[in-house]
Amino acid sequence: MARKDETQVEVDGHRITLSHLDKVLYPSTGTTKADVIDYYRRAAAVMVPQAARRPATRKRWVDGVGTAEHPGKVFFRKDLEPSAPSWVPRADIVHREGTSTYPLVDEPAVLVWLAQLAALEIHTPQWRFADAGPGSRTVSEPRRPDRLVLDLDPGDGVGLADCAEVARWCREILDGMGMDSVPVTSGSKGIHLYAALDGSSTADEVSQVAHRLAEVLEQEHPDRVISSMRRSARAGKVFVDWSQNNGHKTTVCPYSLRGRLRPTVAAPRTWDELEEPDLRQLELPEVLERIDPGLDPIAALGRAAEASSASAEEARDRLATYRSMRDAARTPEPVPAAGEPDDRPGGDGAPMFVIQEHHASSLHWDFRIEHDGVLVSWAVPKGPPLTPDANRLAVQTEDHPLGYGTFEGTIPKGEYGGGTVTIWDTGTCDVEKWRDGKEVIAVCRGREDGGLGGVPRRYAFIRTGPMGRARASAKEDRSWLLHLMKDQPDGTDAGTGDPGAGRDDSAGAPADRPAAAPDDHAAAEDARGEPIEPMLATLGSVRDVTGDEEAWAFEMKWDGIRAIASVTTDGVRLTSRGDTDMTATYPELAELVDAIDPTVLAAGEVVLDGEIVALDDADRPSFSRLQQRSGLTRPRDVEAARERQEVHLMVFDLLRRGGASLLRTPYEERRTALFDVLTPTEHVHAPHADHGDVHHAIDLSRRLDLEGVMAKRLTSVYLPGRRTRTWIKLKNEKHQEVVVIGWRHGRGGRSGGIGSLLVAVPDDDGTLHYAGRVGTGFTDRALRQIQERLTGRARKTPPVDDVPAADRRDAEWVRADLVGEVRYAERTTEGRLRQPSWRGWRPDKDAADVRW
């Protein structure tokens, strides 16, 4: 019989006895054991993928963390508690002293049980067991590490902002090694930096690489970084602790609470957050606010490893994530237990669909389609489009049970998805195409009085994740576009029927929209076959478009080189913004001829505006990789570079169609015509735009790790060579074109070569002024190429007069006619770049045209 202060709960079919729920574990905030248990239950969906199959050591504060004057007693535990329930997954490790049995945090119930024991901190190594699954006690050899970790620990007099700067320096080195990294504010004083590994290296090998990375940073920034273990030398510096890659060491698990005076969390962060001036450690309530809407910056590290090592039984259980996020005792939603039959409503028959209107923390519509025994689900913030010209952002969520197809009710506040759910429309669907993780096309046949208007609707879900070669990492992003197709079933016109729910999905033209008219001047220019000069955007902010968002479309800003493509039946011509012919440099883009509708091409020239990009190993645009292809013209050099790095063309505008100019045609109509004319190929893509919601577009660009967003007025005409405010650049990070004026000699690992570049930026009158020193962002190969490019350009005196004496020391000066681009944090009052990082050369820009 349970005592008065005990209660029993069921988590994933396991009964757990909880006691002393009102005990205060964090006196400074009044956080109780019940709060801690609730945190770990809700955080399980994002924490378990990081901790699964790793032996978990724990730090327990049975009586709480105490106060500064009277700290609580902490117990460090490795071996599994003798009182552990039999269902807790476990595995053995053989030490010289004997065999130790460790718990494995493979399921949410384990986290709840550990929280009941007041195990506030969970620590895990960088490796997982190869075959120790749920309930297994089989001794198993550890896998090789699946992640590298760097612990950036601030010494006396150093703060979190300093750690963030060192984290950015680490990121640049890891980027150069082809490794994506994720920062985690540790919940203590510093920052942890994680990067995924492919499992081909031993722990000793990973430790050696991490140690060398730390040493290089110390050599480059001796006043800011230390890699030595000597504590006495760390004052005023950030210690880059590489030793936690040792196979016998552990690091606090991402999303673990910390046993500090306040309930801080080892919280995964975005790189944008590390740029914030008020960066600080996050606490329990703040992390829950991030988890509930689905923000999980480190998800990729958990999902990749989970997918590679999951057992067949786990792979078949598509509702495991759904169950981990819900407690059947607290929510009216259907929560079938593992192995329990999940009967579809209405028995057998055609696949079902349901669209539920969900009034949670923000209103959205949940679009669910039956597939492979579950309801595959997307959250659509603005609801399903009812006209083909209104695309909608759709975020894929966890699979739901078939029984959810009839669910209506109120999910209690504080539970996952808390709010009211009603059925907006439901019925059967014909699934015409299902390409997992890429594309879904289905005809939905709803109710007579449903939100779809009682007529069949053919929808396409299109993945907006990374493009290019198929990779496992391309499955990590959850962002899609929901599109109502023009070709509707049964002869129905898209957009007919009752819009439903009072929503206006029409993309009707504003009254002041200019009518399409021929552009006589452009026609005369084009008749001679002269390239069209690209239209330019103005750098702006979200404030420039808010309040009038429905009048704008939002494209992703691709990190590459602008290109105007002229396509005829005779071939392709590519020209840059500076009117340089780039056709020979990018031969794979000759397939543009195959991408254009042949009937349109037969009528005359087709001219497209787009961006040439190179993709990194995670299929994201990489300006540094594009440098490997830029400026090459000799066929042998082009083919050799193409073997190493392919390029792609992201097409976003149609300027001439079948010989007819579209320059004076509104943007909205040009985009519609583009999708009618162009069919994507292996190296040619036509990304969709988001309409009317700048915040969703910016969020998507950050999730895809893109440069930013281009906001374009639906009514805007194309003005060649002109910079207008009808196109607005919204950048996620600050970039600046700079003129290279010299370089300084390297030290340590860069001895005998370039250590940093000295750069300048002209003022409004064209007079050059010193802008600072750029010493990061270089790969070894890039430094060699820069050295070769600067050879023969030497001059005796600096091209500018305002270089400080400290930066003149050992400087070598060059002619001020080469343009590069840097990323930077801010511009100082003296006009200097703060925290600049090299991105690459800009051969398409002239030094005389560079401005702040």
Image: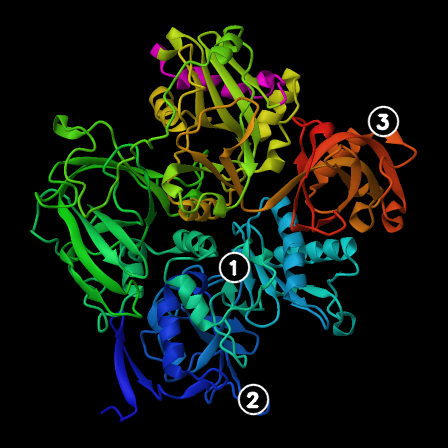
Q: Which residues are magenta?
A: 578-599
Check disc 3 and report the residue beneath it. Answer: 792
- Residue 269: which numbered mark, if any? 1
Q: Quadrant of residue 471?
A: top left
The amino acid on which the numbered mark 3 sits, given as a three-letter code, is Gly
Q: For the residues marked 3 and 1, what is the alpha-carbon distance in whole angstroms?
A: 45 Å
Residue 574 among those drawn in magenta: no
Q: Is residue 189 toward the left or the right of residue 526 in the image?
A: right
- State the residue at coordinates (25%, 90%): 2
Q: Marks 2/1: CA distance?
A: 29 Å
Position of residue 226 in the picture relative to residue 670 (left or right): right
- Main SS category, magenta section: helix
Residue 71 circle label: 2
Instruction: Report how far apart the C-alphas of labels 3 and 2 lie in the structure.
Output: 66 Å
Question: Which amino acid type corresponds to the residue marked 2 in the rendered image?
Answer: Pro
State whether residue 66 is above or below residue 317: below
- Identify the residue shown where x is 60% and y is 24%: 577
Q: Earlier in the sequence, mark 3 or mark 2?
A: 2
Residue 691, image x and y in percent? 37, 39
SS at mark 1 in the image:
loop
Q: Answer whether labels 3 and 1 touch (C-beta < 8 Å).
A: no
Report crowding for label 3: few under 14, some 14 to 19, many 20 or more residues within 10 A (C-alpha): few
Query: What residue is at 14 percent from the left and 47 percent from the top?
Result: 426
Label 2 SS: loop
Please tell me which residue lies in front, 722 or 212: 722
Outermost residue toward the right in this view = 796
